[in-house]
Image: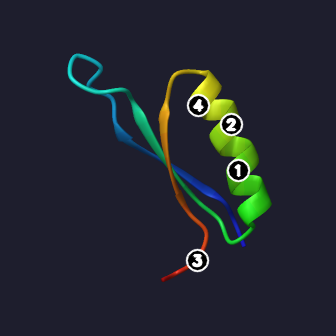
Amino acid sequence: MPTYFIKVSSDTRHTMPTILIIDDEKELCVILEDLFSSEGFRVLLAYDGI
């Protein structure tokens, strides 16, 4: 199953840029969350359909 990266917001005047990471492999989501968080992004994760 492919992994999708969706940039939700890029208005840095009011909020941090936000990335939504969707993948069914929780470990991959956590690794990517760490990576993007360290670059200054707010990261939202979704690893199940619930």
Q: Which residue is mark 1?
A: 30
Mark nearer the N terminus (3 vs 4): 4
Mark nearer the N terminus (2 vs 3): 2
Q: CA distance from mark 2 to mark 3?
A: 19 Å
Q: Which residue is mark 2?
A: 34
Q: Is residue 1 above or below residue 39?
A: below
Q: Are marks 2 and 1 in contact (CB under 8 Å)?
A: yes
Q: Are marks 4 and 2 in contact (CB under 8 Å)?
A: yes
Percent of width and height locating residue 6: 47, 49
Mark nearer the N terminus (4 vs 1): 1
Q: CA distance from mark 2 to mark 1?
A: 6 Å
Q: Which residue is mark 4?
A: 37
Q: CA distance from mark 3 to mark 4?
A: 21 Å
Percent of width and height locating residue 21: 56, 53
Local secondary structure at mark 2: helix
- Name the residue furthest bottom: 50
Q: Is residue 50 above or below residue 24?
A: below
Percent of width and height locating residue 33: 63, 42
Seen at 33% across and 29% down, the residue is 10
Q: Which residue is mark 3?
A: 48
Three-letter amino acid code of the residue under disc 2: Asp
Seen at 75% across and 67% down, the residue is 25
Local secondary structure at mark 4: helix
Mark nearer the N terminus (1 vs 3): 1
The residue nearer to you, when weighing 35 against 9, is 35
Three-letter amino acid code of the residue under disc 4: Ser
Three-letter amino acid code of the residue under disc 3: Asp
